[in-house]
Amino acid sequence: MFPSFSDQRSLCRASAIPNGYFLLLLIISVLIINSAACSNRNCQVLEPCSLPTDCGPGLYCGNCPAMGKNQPICTRGQATIPTTIINGLPFNKYSWLMTHNAFSIVDAPPLPGVQRITFYNQEDTVTNQLRNGVRGLMLDMYDFENDIWLCHSFRGQCYNFTAFQPAINTLKEVETFLSENPSEIVTIVIEDYVHTTKGLTNLFTNAGLDKYWFPVSKMPRKGEDWPTVTDMVQENHRLLVFTSIASKEADEGIAYQWRYMVENEPGDGGVVQGSCPNRKESRPLNSKSASLFLQNSFPSFPVESDSCKEHSATVGELVGTCYKAAGNVMPNFLAVNFYMRSDGGGVFDVLDGMNGQTLCGCSSVAACQAGAPFGTCKNVAVSNTTQTPNTFGSFSGSVQLSGSASTIHFMNLLYFFLLFFSFLVFQL
Ligand SMILES: *[C@@H]1O[C@H](CO)[C@@H](O)[C@H](O)[C@H]1NC(C)=O
Ligand SMILES: *[C@@H]1O[C@H](CO)[C@@H](O)[C@H](O)[C@H]1NC(C)=O
C-alpha cells in the first residue's frame, strides 16, 4: 500500500497562482526539478522526492512543516535490527524502538454508534509497527465488556467512547509476527487496569503467546546481564511482558515492571532538555539494580504534526541526558509517539547511534562489524545507514501514515476538556 501522507497536499497549493506566466515558469521548473531529481526507489535519505516510489528501501517520501520543511524528502521509516549486525550479546546490551500507546491508532474504527473522544499516538497497525522494526509496545489494558480491552482512559475505567478494541486482537498480531520471524524478540509493557482473576494469563494464553513467554524466574533482579539474545531465541523465550501491578508477579507470574526496569518520567516531564528525572514508581535511574532502562520521550499531549520536530535533533539530546543520568547506561527502550515522523533520520538514526555506541563503540550500528574488536568501525556516511541488512523485505508494504493533523489536534483539545471537566466534577 502506498503512503497516504496528508501533508503532501501542500504541494498542490501552487495551483492557486493566478497568472499564466507564473504557471509556465512553474511547469518549467517542475520539469527541471523532475529531470534532475532521483526517482524509482533510487533516492537516498534527505533527497527531495515527489512520489512514494521515489525513495529507496526503508524510506518514505515525507515532509516536516512544523520545522518549515515543506519540501518532501526521503525520510526513514524503518529501524535497523541491531541483532542482524551484532548478534549474541545479552539482551540488555541492545536498544529498541518502543511505541507509546501502540494501540491508539489514528483511523482505528470506534465502537459502532459511538464517537470516540480520546487522543492518538500512532498512525499504523501494530503489525506494521513490528514490520518497521518496533520491538516494544506500550499497551493500556482494562476490564471492559466482560473482556480485556485496549483503551485510553482515566481513573482506571474504560468507557465506550475511549475504547479501541479487545486486547486479544492486537496480541494475535504479535503472535503472528513472532511465529513468522523466529529470531525476533518483542517486549510488551502493560499499563494494567485489569482486575479480573487471571485475566492477563488467560488473555495471553488465548492469543497463543504463552509459548514465547520469558519466565519471570529467569529475569535478573540485581542488575546482572540478561541471557543472550541467541539463548532467548533458542529457548523460544521471545516475549517479555511487564505489568504495572506488583501483585501479579506472585499471582500470575507476570513480571512487575519496576523490579526489572528503571524508567524516566513519561510525558512532559520526560522531554525537558538537560533533565531526566525518574518516574515515581521507578528506582533512581543510576541505581544499577535493574538491568533494563526505559526512556520515555514524548509530550503528554500527542500532536501528530509536531512529532517530526520532536524527532529531529531533540530526541538525541534527551537520550544523551538520560544516558548520563543513568550513570552512563544506554536506554534499552526508546518510547515515542508517531515514531515514523521526522525531518530525515528521526528516532531511527538516534537508535542506530545508541546501538553503535554500546555494541561496538562506533557512531552508528551501521559501522559495526561482526567479530571485529570493540572500536573497529566501518567508514559509513550517514546517508548509508539505511543500507544495513533488513530481513523484512520491501518497505512498500509498511507505510501507513494517515490522518489529518488538524482533526487530531481538535480531538486532543476535546479530550483535554473532558479530562478537565471530569476532574472538576470529581473534586466537587
Ligand atoms: C455508551 O455507554 C453509555 C453509558 O456509559 C451508554 O449510555 C450508551 O448507550 C453506550 N453507547 C453505545 C452505542 O453502546
Ligand atoms: C554511500 O552510498 C552511495 C550510493 O549508494 C555510494 O556512492 C557511497 O560511496 C557510499 N558511501 C560510503 C561511505 O560507503
Image (cartoon, rainbow, N blue to C red):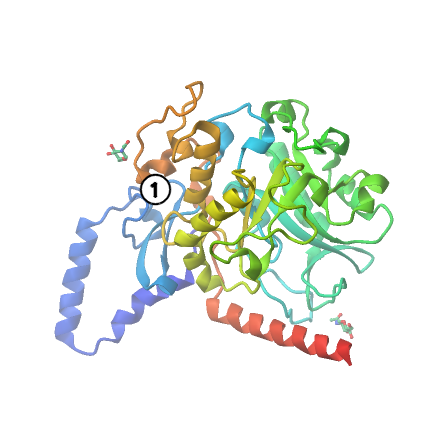
**221 vs 160: above or below:** above
Instruction: Note whether residue 1 is visible.
Output: no
**69 vs 366: above or below:** below
In this rendered view, identify the residue nearer to me: 14 or 183.
183
Q: Residue 37 at what x, y percent from top left?
A: 22, 49
Q: Residue drawn at (68%, 78%), measured in percent from left and top?
A: 421
Quarter of the picture containing the C terminus is bottom right
Q: Residue drawn at (54%, 63%), measured in percent from left and top?
A: 302
Location of residue 143 (image quadrant): bottom right
Left or right of 97? Residue 188 is: right
Q: Residue 228 at what x, y percent from top left?
A: 60, 25
Tell me the residue that label 1 is attached to. Answer: 56
| Residue lying farthest to the bottom in this orientation | 428
Left or right of 254? Residue 347 is: left
In this rendered view, identify the residue nearer to me: 394 or 100.
100
Find out if the beta carbon at label 1 lies less than 8 Å from the nearest ligand 2 atom.
Answer: no
**390 vs 12: above or below:** above
Instruction: Note whether residue 191 is visible.
Output: yes
In this rendered view, identify the residue nearer to me: 230 or 204.
230
Q: Quadrant of ligand 2?
A: top left
In this rendered view, identify the residue nearer to me: 112 or 5.
5
Circle 1: residue type: Gly
Q: Residue 238 at what x, y percent from top left?
A: 65, 32
Q: Give the structural element (helix, strand or loop) at label 1.
A: loop
Q: Residues within 10 Å of mark 1 (few under 14, many from 20)?
A: many
Q: Residue drawn at (30%, 48%), measured in percent from left and top?
A: 46
How many marks the image carries: the answer is 1
